[in-house]
Image (cartoon, rainbow, N blue to C red):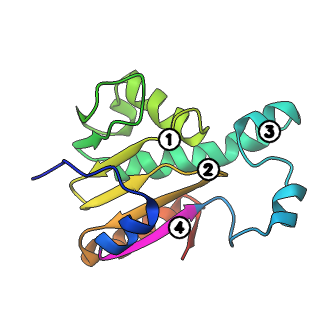
């Protein structure tokens, strides 16, 4: 399996893959006004506004999502400064993740680093995003419905 993806922007990713959607804590694309009225849009916002407990509920949903998506292995593309480019991680299950993998996912959700993962078992590329929204790109449409179910089970929303 070829894990060497070129460094390309979201628009080019949409053209390359069979299906795509974004996964968000919000149930629709927010307007600029709605963004400004939210108690927080990212982790530091929650810290500054004394809303970390509320933020943690959303972060836990993303950790549940990624914990249920990541199977025996995944590939991290070269966005994180803390790990070698194109690192391949072998994991048994989410609770058995290496501490560095949990830290990596948490940092992506908190927007400290925007990472890019490939999950071979779903033929799915996940590009970390901003404002509690991340982007999913499928090489094969057969995996869309199983992933949508996991997203919904996590209490998150699909945005197209």
Distance from label 1 to label 2 (Cα)?
A: 8 Å
- Which numbered marker is on residue 152? 4
Q: Which residue is rendered at x = 68% and y = 70% of the image?
A: 27
* Residue picked out by circle 2: 130
Instruction: Find residue 8 and report its horizontal and vertical position in percent.
Output: 36, 55
Q: In the displayed structure, does residue 77 sit left or right of residue 154?
A: left
**Quadrant of residue 80 within the rendered picture:** top left
For the residue labelled by badge 3, is the local secondary structure a helix, a strand or a loop? helix
The residue wearing badge 1 is 114
User: Residue, x 86% and y 49% (percent of image)?
Assistant: 39
Q: Earlier in the sequence, mark 2 or mark 3?
A: 3
Give the residues drawn in magenta, as a range: 18-23
Residue at the spot of label 3: 45
* Mark 3 closeness class: few <14, some 14–19, many ≥20 residues within 10 Å: some
Q: Quadrant of residue 81?
A: top left
Disc nearer the start of the sequence (2/4): 2
Foreground tag (4 vs 1) = 1
Local crowd size for mark 1, using a 10 Å CA cut-off: few (<14), some (14–19), many (≥20): many
Q: CA distance from mark 4 to mark 1?
A: 23 Å
Q: Is residue 101 above or below residue 17?
A: above
> Percent from the top left, x then y, of residue 96?
34, 30
Number of on-image labels = 4
Q: Secondary structure at mark 2?
A: loop
Considering only order in the chain, which callout, 2 or 1, is on the residue closer to the N terminus?
A: 1
Q: Are marks 1 and 2 in contact (CB under 8 Å)?
A: yes
Can the viewer see residue 52?
no
Q: Which label was assigned to residue 88? A: none
How far apart are the two marked residues, 3 and 1, measured between alpha carbons?
A: 17 Å
Q: Decide if residue 122 is in sight here.
A: yes
Give the image location of residue 88, x and y in percent. Answer: 22, 35
């Amino acid at each position: 399996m070829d894990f060497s993806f070129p460094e390309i922007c979201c628009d080019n990713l949409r053209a390359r893959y069979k299906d795509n959607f974004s996964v968000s804590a919000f149930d629709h694309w927010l307007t600029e006004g709605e963004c400004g009225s939210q108690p927080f849009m990212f982790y530091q916002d929650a810290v500054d506004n004394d809303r970390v407990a509320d933020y943690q509920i959303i972060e836990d949903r993303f950790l549940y999502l990624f914990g249920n998506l990541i199977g025996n292995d995944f590939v991290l593309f070269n966005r994180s400064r803390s790990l070698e480019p194109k690192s391949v991680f072998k994991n048994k299950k989410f609770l058995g993740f290496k501490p560095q993998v949990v830290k990596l996912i948490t940092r992506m959700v908190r927007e400290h680093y925007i990472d890019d993962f490939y999950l071979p078992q779903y033929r799915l590329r996940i590009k970390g995003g901003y404002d509690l929204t991340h982007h999913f790109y499928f090489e094969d449409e057969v995996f869309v419905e199983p992933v949508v179910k996991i997203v919904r089970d996590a209490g998150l929303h699909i945005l197209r």
